[in-house]
Image (tube, rainbow, N blue to C red):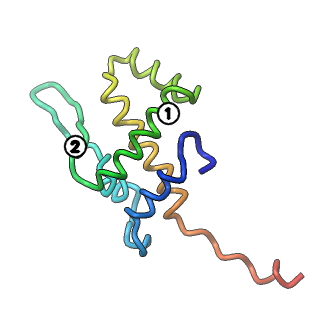
């Protein structure tokens, strides 16, 4: 929750997505798919673009959307990112899609990555 824009409600929605066995999610891409923020190719002809996945857990997707909006308004690095992507010609919808995927990656790193067990030597002192 120390990350900008992530509240207890967001964490609760992510824990619901994870369920009682977070080891079943093998990668951040699988977590993004569960949240419905994995990109799907939507190219036609010479145009190469992606769209949002309409599947996945809609509450988790909505939570990521709220975090993205808060960061776009109040987080200086995110605001700089939005300005840079806008200058590249990306639409606000595409920028939000990229931000949601980044936020899902960040949450996955905090919730699903195994932490090394505390050593017994440190507890003996």
**In the picture, which quadrant includes the C terminus?**
bottom right
Residue 45 image label: none
Query: Quick one: label 1 or label 2, which is nearer the N terminus?
Result: 2
Residue 103, x across and y down, in percent: 46, 44
Q: Which residue is mark 1?
A: 70
Camera-nearest residue between 21 and 42 = 21
Q: Which residue is drawn at the image coordinates 37% and 29% (left, top)? A: 95
Callout 2: SS: strand
Residue at the left extreme, as displayed: 45
Residue at the top extreme, as displayed: 87
Callout 1: SS: helix
Does 84 appear above or below 61? above
In this rendering, position of residue 123 left or right of residue 103: right
In this rendering, position of residue 76 left or right of residue 41: right
Residue 41, x across and y down, in percent: 20, 40
Does 94 appear above or below 123? above
Does 114 appear above or below 56? below
Residue 40 image label: 2
Residue 97, x across and y down, in percent: 34, 36
Q: Quadrant of residue 47?
A: top left
Residue at the front extreme, as displayed: 9
Mark 1 vs mark 2, CA separation in Å: 25 Å
Does 93 appear above or below 17? above
Q: Which residue is drawn at the image coordinates 33% and 17% (left, top)? A: 89
Q: Which residue is drawn at the image coordinates 48% and 52% (left, top)? A: 9
Judge depth for marks 1 and 2 and give the one in front: 1
Residue 31, x across and y down, in percent: 37, 58
Q: Which residue is drawn at the image coordinates 63% and 72% (left, top)? A: 116
């Amino acid at each position: 929750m120390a990350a900008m824009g992530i509240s207890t409600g967001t964490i609760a929605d992510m824990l619901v997505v994870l369920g009682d066995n977070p080891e079943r999610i093998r990668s951040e891409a699988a977590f993004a798919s569960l949240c419905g923020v994995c990109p799907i190719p939507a190219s036609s002809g010479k145009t190469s673009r992606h769209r949002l996945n309409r599947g996945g857990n809609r509450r988790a997707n909505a939570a990521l959307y709220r975090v993205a909006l808060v960061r776009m308004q109040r987080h200086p690095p995110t605001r700089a990112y939005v300005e840079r992507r806008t200058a590249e010609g990306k639409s606000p919808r595409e920028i939000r899609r990229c931000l949601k995927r980044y936020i899902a990656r960040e949450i996955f790193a905090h919730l699903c990555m195994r932490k090394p067990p505390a050593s017994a030597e440190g507890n003996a002192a």
